[in-house]
Image (tube, rainbow, N blue to C red):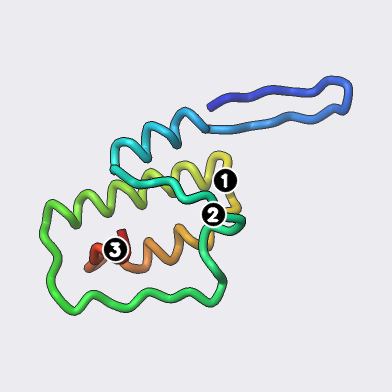
């Protein structure tokens, strides 16, 4: 976590850019910059097939990493992380 402060304006800034970059590389997730992480009307379609146990574990690790990021420094991604977490029982590639 990187913390910096602006003494003149009495502001503190927190970011986890290095953690985020490592996480994206670890899970092989492409970056697509957007203004909002997920549109508010977005909804996932449930996975009809049973997912592979290895993929299931990788998905859970990804969502856990996003939760860590959300709690520490990025509350703005909360809605998207919750939507991803709702698919933890049986995720698909579309959820990933």
Label placed on residue 88: 3
Q: Secondary structure at mark 1?
A: loop
Residue 4: image quadrant is top right
Identify the residue shown where x is 87% and y is 28%.
9
Could you tell me if the residues under marks 3 and 1 are in contact, i.e. CB atoms within 8 Å? no
| Residue where numbered disc 1 is placed | 74
71 shown above or below 92:
above
| Residue at left offset 59%, top offset 50% | 75
Q: Secondary structure at mark 3?
A: loop
Give the total of numbered labels. 3
Q: Give percent across and percent down for residue 18.
A: 47, 28
Badge 2: residue crowd in 10 Å (few <14, some 14–19, many ≥20): some
Percent of width and height locating residue 89:
25, 67
Sequence-wise, the earlier of marks 3 and 1 is 1
Distance from Cα at disc 3 to Cα at disc 1: 21 Å
C-alpha separation, residue under disc 2 versus residue under disc 3: 17 Å
Q: Are marks 2 and 1 in contact (CB under 8 Å)?
A: yes
Left or right: residue 32 versus residue 59 is: right
Q: CA gap, disc 2 to disc 1?
A: 6 Å
> In the shown orientation, is residue 18 left or right of residue 88?
right
Secondary structure at numbered mark 2: helix
Residue that appears at 29% across and 43% down = 27
Indicate the position of residue 34 as horizontal and vertical percent values.
Answer: 56, 54
Point out residue 6 in the picture as x, y percentages from the top left corner: 79, 23
* Label drawn at residue 87: none
Q: Which mark is residue 77?
A: 2
Disc 2 versus disc 3: nearer the observer: 2
Residue at 56 percent across and 72 percent down: it is 40
Picture quarter with the C terminus: bottom left
């Amino acid at each position: 976590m990187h913390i910096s402060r602006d003494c003149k304006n009495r502001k503190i800034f927190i970011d986890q850019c290095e953690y985020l970059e490592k996480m994206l590389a670890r899970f092989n997730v492409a970056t697509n910059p957007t203004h909002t992480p997920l549109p508010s009307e977005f909804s996932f379609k449930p996975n009809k097939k049973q997912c592979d146990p290895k993929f299931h574990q990788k998905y859970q690790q990804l969502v856990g990493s996003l939760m860590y990021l959300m709690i520490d420094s990025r509350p703005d991604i909360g809605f998207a992380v919750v939507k991803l977490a709702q698919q933890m029982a049986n995720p698909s590639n579309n959820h990933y």
